Image (tube, grey):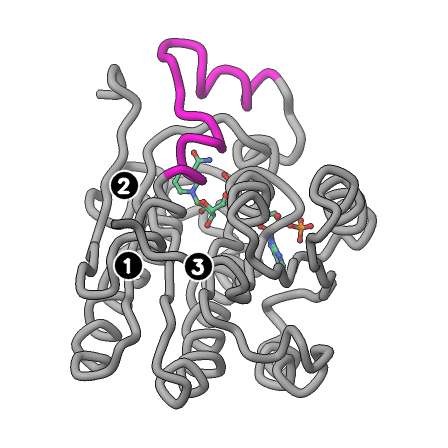
Amino acid sequence: QPLDISGWTVLITGASSGFGWAAAWRFAELGCKLVLVARRTDRLRELAAEICTKYKEARVHCAPLDVCDVDKIESLPFMLPPEFAQVDILVNNAGLALGKLPVQDNVTANVLTMMQTNVSSLIVATATFSKGMVARGRGHIINIGSIAGHEAYANGSVYCATKHAVTAFTTAARHDLVGTPVRVTCISPGFAETEFSLVRFGNDTDKAAAVYSNLVSLSAKDIADQIVYVATRPAHVQIADIICWPTNQA
Ligand code: NDP
């Protein structure tokens, strides 16, 4: 019997695009309250308006912020309207890669941005929201890792390092939370066609398209399905990690 999460509050970072956007729709469909986090306020408002048009009972709150500003994440529970403040499911999804360069050419500013976005924010958000979950006796932390968190490849040293950190942190967090009802999951996708490659290649559409040219890539919806799948398993079932490849990705 799937877990009934209707009425639960789900906070999704990186909700303005890709996996986060698609996951918001899936959780809305299940009757969850949504807190949408990303930097692009207009995109969050657009998503909230679309969801509220389709689901008249939907409750959606936009919390535009840069997750690299970890002070803002820590203060978020105090800034949210009371009906959204008790987050039951945290989807740590915001993330990015910047460039594909050999180690000797790594750009320090990009290194710091990737570390802060993909790792520090996720760690701080987990600390910030897991306390309340433990106290209330229900909760789920869902971290979006990557195949780059299980394998390392040339010209991706920083991104691979950040996603290996996500994998390791998720495992450690799961150990820390054993004995509480809070579940911790890492979902590790392969190539998925979102805005990810556009961001990676500085909006170079040719380079971005080339990433997906030789395979049928995953869609954002494929990953949203995985996110909702783990969140709706019966309470005693904890999916630790899902590695989800496009069928013909080498
Ligand atoms: P998108 O680029 O489509 O979405 C990334 C999201 O992260 C956007 O909503 C963006 O919002 C948000 N984000 C980025 N930086 C920040 C920031 N500093 N503060 C707040 N929000 C931020 O990519 P995906 O949906 O594909 O990526 C989602 C996750 O999946 C990432 O962690 C990525 O590493 C991972 N992943 C992606 C794969 C792929 O092939 N697409 C494969 C494996 C993992 P905004 O710009 O508005 O702030």
Earlier sequence position, callout 2 versus callout 3: 3
Earlier sequence position, callout 1 versus callout 3: 3
Residue underneath mark 3: 5
Which residue is at the front of the view, 112 or 228? 228
Disc 3 marks which amino acid? Ile
Residue at the (46%, 65%) spot, across then down: 90
Residue underneath mark 2: 147
Which residue is at the front of the view, 24 or 173? 24
Dots 2, 1 in contact, CB < 8 A? no
Disc 2 marks which amino acid? Ile
Which residue is at the front of the view, 78 or 248? 78
Q: Which residues are magenta?
A: 206-225
Residue 92: horizontal and vertical position, in percent? 46, 60
**Mark 2 vs mark 3, CA separation in Å:** 28 Å
Using a 10 Å C-alpha cutoff, classify the residue at mark 2 as few (fewer than 14 neighbours), some (14 to 19) or many (20 or more). many
Q: Secondary structure at mark 2?
A: helix
On screen, 54 above or below 72? above
Q: Which mark is residue 224?
A: none
Q: Which mark is residue 185?
A: 1
Residue at the (73%, 78%) spot, across then down: 81
**Quadrant occupied by the C terminus:** top left
On screen, 42 above or below 39? above
Residue at the (20%, 47%) spot, across then down: 150
- Residue, far top: 214
**Mark 2 vs mark 1, CA separation in Å:** 14 Å
Residue 37: horizontal and vertical position, in percent? 65, 60
Using a 10 Å C-alpha cutoff, classify the residue at mark 1 as few (fewer than 14 neighbours), some (14 to 19) or many (20 or more). many
62 on left or right of 196: right
Residue 177: horizontal and vertical position, in percent? 23, 80
Residue 10: horizontal and vertical position, in percent? 53, 62
Q: Is residue 194 magenta?
A: no
On screen, 193 above or below 75? above
